[in-house]
Image (cartoon, rainbow, N blue to C red):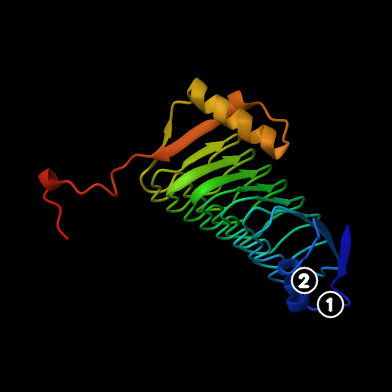
Amino acid sequence: MTVLDLEQLSVREINYALHHRDSMESVTLVNPGGAHNLAVGLDWPGEVEIRGHAGYFVGGMNKQATITVHGSVASSVAENMMSGLVRVRGNASQCAGASMHGGLLVVEGDAAARCGISLKGGDVVVGGRVGHASGFMAQAGRIVVCGDAGASLGDSLYEAVIYVGGGIKSLGADAQEEEMTEADVVVVRALLAKAGLAEDPARFRRVASARTLYHWNADAQQEY
C-alpha cells in the first residue's frame, strides 16, 4: 500500500501521483484537511482510501476506481462519474452525484440539496436523508434514499427512478408516486446489498416521471 500525505504534498502533486501511479494498486491519502479536488479523473481499477474529511469534487469524473472517504465531503462528490465506486462514510453536501453517467455513489450519512441532480446513469444510494430538489431533471439511473426526502423531490424528472424509504416532504413538478412492484423490490434489494446497508426493501416507495412536461402535445394546442 502506498501512503501519500497531504501535509507534505500539494493536491496537484497528489493527483499527479494518482494519475502516474506505476504499479500502485492501493493508495491511502492521509491528512486531507478538507482539501478540494482529491482523486479526480482517475482511470484505473485500483483503490483509494481518504482518511478524513474532503472538500468539493472529490472523486469527480471517476472511471473504474474505488474511492472511500472516511469522513464527510463538500459539494459535488463523484460529479460526472463514469464508472467505479465512490463511498462516503459520513455526510455529503449539495449536488452529490451530479450528472453521473455510471458507477455507484454511496453516502452512508445524509446528503444535502440537489442530490443526484441531472443524473444521466449509474446509481446513488443514501443511507440517511436528502435535501430539497434531489433528483432534479434526472434523466437516467436510480436514486435510493433510506431516510426522508426534502421538498420538490424529482422535479422535472425524466427517466430516472427514485426510491424513498422514509417520508417525502413534497414532490416536484411532473413527479409522481407509483406502485412499488416486485421488480422494484428486487432492484432496491440489490442496490442496498451493493451499498452494504441493512434495510428492508419492501418499505420503499417509488417515484418516477408522469411524463407530462417533455412530451409535446399538438392536440393541447401547445405553443413554442
> Which residue in the structure is indicated by mark 1?
9
| Category of crowding for the residue at label 1, using alpha-carbon neighbours closer than 10 angstroms: few (below 14), some (14–19), many (at least 20) | few
Q: Is residue 48 left or right of residue 43?
A: right
Looking at the rendered image, the quarter that the N terminus falls into is bottom right
Please give the label number shown on residue 17: 2
Q: Quadrant of residue 77?
A: bottom right
Residue under the point 37% across and 48% down: 173
Q: Where is residue 108 drawn, in percent x and y?
A: 72, 46
Q: In the image, residue 35 lies at what x, y percent?
A: 76, 71
Q: Position of residue 201 (x, y in %)?
A: 61, 27
The answer to which image quadrant residue 32 occupies is bottom right
| Quadrant where the image shows the C terminus | bottom left
110 vs 54: above or below: above
Which quadrant of the view contains residue 33?
A: bottom right
Picture coordinates of residue 183 (x, y %)? 50, 24
Q: Are marks 2 and 1 in contact (CB under 8 Å)?
A: yes
Mark 2 Cα-neighbour bin, 10 Å: few <14, some 14–19, many ≥20: some
Q: Amino acid at mark 2?
A: Ala
Q: Is residue 103 above or below residue 187?
A: below
Secondary structure of residue under mark 2: helix
Identified by mark 1, the residue type is Leu
Q: Is residue 51 visible?
A: no
Q: Work out which residue is located at the far top of the displayed protein and give it.
A: 182
Describe the element under mark 1 as helix, strand or loop.
loop
Q: Do we see residue 89 in this rendering?
A: yes
Residue in the picture at 51% in, 53% down = 101
Between marks 2 and 1 in the image, the one whose residue lies nearer the viewer: 2
Query: Going from the N terminus, do you reach mark 2 or mark 1 first?
Result: 1
The disc at residue 155 is none
